[in-house]
Image: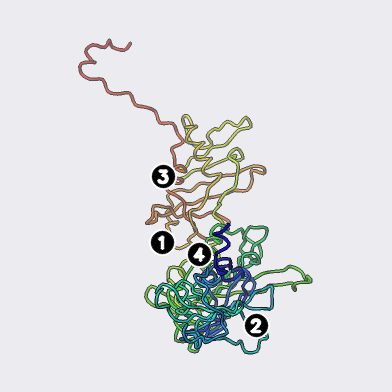
């Protein structure tokens, strides 16, 4: 009890600098010897307002704020009503002001200078950072205005003074709000627009028939764009778009929400919320810009090459969706034609062919065919894909009507080991794996096993056949 009684008053004081929570800060104003920077949180993201208007990196801004909100006082030095020159606080070097979203008050940290926010009535809570104490070189004198005192904090706090707009700038190419994303429009000069639409979690190629799209590929594209970081900021004022080929982009992506009917919140129709334009290529980079931002940036050319304006490239990978037992008749043409039909008792018999049917090979063919998937779509069919001299033509009919004919044609071998293929009634060429191709051309006629020739010794010892 005696030890508690003789403690100095400062030992009972709260050493937490502020109870302001990082997540509740809505605005930050930072003054440093290099100038003034202002940041503001809009919805869930941070933006730079001064000295330029740009997106800020949410994590980096939160890290900046947490240097203040997590700071703990080292020593209680004096109140702030006297001469502040001995502490280097009469003319502080910089300041940071934190604005709480719930209160109209601010928490303001000033590093060497008091701060007044023009045009605002909000009062900031200010921490001024001054000189280094002679006896404690790892500390700095500070003054936190709301508490009216001079303290010391770890010298690390002065790193705030070194913060520049580039340090907290968001270098992601684009922010895409996937919660409201319904349509992606891919526009390239001289080509029809490709519109990808989402409904109930699935994507389609919007058109007269709303062809199913490869939802996995579209989600991967969105994720890639979300995670893509610019290789450099080229210009902060895009005053010369022709220089970068952005006056007439070679490709533009537009992300939109879509409402089929009028509601209290929105009108029917498409509402774009972000667009990325790609211009000229330069080495391994391509120039780009968000159409609602004044900046020109450079991004990887590989990103640009992944975004195809050809709607055929976005088709779903599933080629056939048929149960194996539904296939009724099949015809396979390689160097010769074989044809089989399934009877009512589910037994297969030859329509064109002879000998015993290799049931295992036939079942492998049927299973592969019924659930055939493309490895990827190549786009328009070209002569180089070898369909004039196909390696395999496979035709079949399936229940319930057994009338609609399906035909798969396999052409040339690709450099990656896949095979070019196409189907009647569907535009474009796709690739199938070499494993699927081998299953589709398995021999269906059981090969007779030749008896081995008898050795000379055996010929002597074996009795002649009757």
Residue 335's mark?
A: 3
Quarter of the rendering containing residue 302: bottom left
Residue at position x 47%, y 54% from top? Answer: 431
Give the spatial CA distance, label 4 vs label 1.
31 Å
Measured as percent of width and height from the top left, residue 466 is found at 33, 10
Quickly name the residue at label 1: 384
Label 3 crowd (10 A; few <14 / some 14-19 / many >=20): few
- The residue at 72%/68% (across/down) is 259
- Look at the numbered discs 3 and 4 and tell me whether their residues touch, using CB distance below 8 Å: no
- Where in the figure is residue 354, as x and y percent of width and height? 47, 32
Q: Closer to the observer: label 4 or label 1?
A: 4
Which of pointers 2 and 4 indicates the residue nearer the eye?
A: 2
* Image disc number at residue 224: 4
How many angstroms separate mark 3 from mark 4 (CA)?
A: 45 Å
Q: Which callout, 3 or 2, points at the residue further toward the start of the chain?
A: 2
Q: Where is residue 193 in the image (x, y as percent from the top left)?
A: 58, 72
């Amino acid at each position: 009890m005696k030890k508690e009684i003789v403690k100095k008053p400062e030992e009972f004081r709260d050493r937490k600098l502020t109870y302001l929570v990082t997540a509740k800060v809505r605005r930050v104003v930072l003054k440093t010897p290099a100038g003034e920077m202002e940041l503001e949180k809009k919805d869930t993201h941070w933006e730079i307002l001064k000295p330029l208007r740009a997106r800020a990196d949410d994590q980096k801004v939160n890290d900046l704020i947490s240097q203040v909100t997590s700071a703990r006082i080292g020593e209680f030095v004096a109140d702030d009503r006297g001469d502040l020159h001995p502490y280097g606080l009469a003319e502080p070097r910089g300041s940071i002001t934190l604005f709480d979203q719930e209160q109209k008050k601010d928490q303001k940290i000033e590093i060497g200078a008091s701060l007044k926010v023009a045009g605002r009535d909000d009062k900031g809570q200010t921490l001024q950072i001054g000189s280094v104490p002679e006896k404690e070189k790892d500390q700095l004198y500070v003054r936190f205005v709301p508490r009216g005192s001079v303290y010391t904090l770890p010298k690390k706090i002065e790193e705030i003074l070194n913060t520049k707009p580039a340090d907290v700038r968001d270098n992601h190419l684009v922010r895409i709000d996937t919660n409201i994303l319904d349509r992606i429009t891919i526009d390239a000069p001289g080509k029809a627009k490709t519109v990808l639409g989402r409904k109930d979690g699935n994507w389609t190629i919007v058109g007269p028939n709303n062809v199913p799209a490869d939802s996995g590929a579209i989600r991967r594209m969105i994720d890639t764009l979300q995670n893509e970081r610019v290789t450099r900021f080229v210009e902060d004022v895009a005053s010369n778009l022709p220089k970068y080929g952005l006056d007439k982009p070679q490709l533009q992506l537009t992300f939109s929400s879509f409402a089929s009917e009028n509601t209290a919140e929105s009108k029917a129709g498409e509402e774009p919320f972000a667009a990325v334009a790609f211009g000229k290529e330069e080495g391994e980079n391509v120039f780009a810009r968000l159409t609602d931002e004044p900046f020109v940036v450079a991004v990887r050319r590989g990103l640009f090459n992944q975004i195809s304006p050809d709607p055929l490239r976005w088709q779903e990978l599933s080629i056939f969706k048929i149960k194996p037992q539904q296939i009724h008749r099949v015809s396979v043409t390689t160097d010769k034609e074989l044809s089989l039909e399934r009877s009512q008792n589910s037994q297969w018999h030859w329509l064109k062919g002879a000998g015993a049917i290799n049931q295992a090979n036939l079942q492998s063919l049927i299973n592969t065919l019924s659930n055939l998937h493309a490895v990827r779509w190549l786009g328009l069919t070209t002569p180089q894909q070898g369909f004039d001299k196909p390696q395999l033509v496979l035709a079949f009919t399936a229940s319930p009507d057994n009338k609609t004919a399906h035909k798969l044609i396999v052409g040339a071998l690709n450099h990656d080991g896949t095979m070019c293929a196409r189907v009647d009634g569907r535009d474009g060429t796709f690739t199938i794996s070499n494993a699927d191709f081998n299953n589709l051309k398995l021999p269906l006629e059981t090969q007779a096993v030749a008896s081995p020739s008898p050795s000379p010794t055996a010929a002597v010892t074996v009795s002649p056949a009757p």
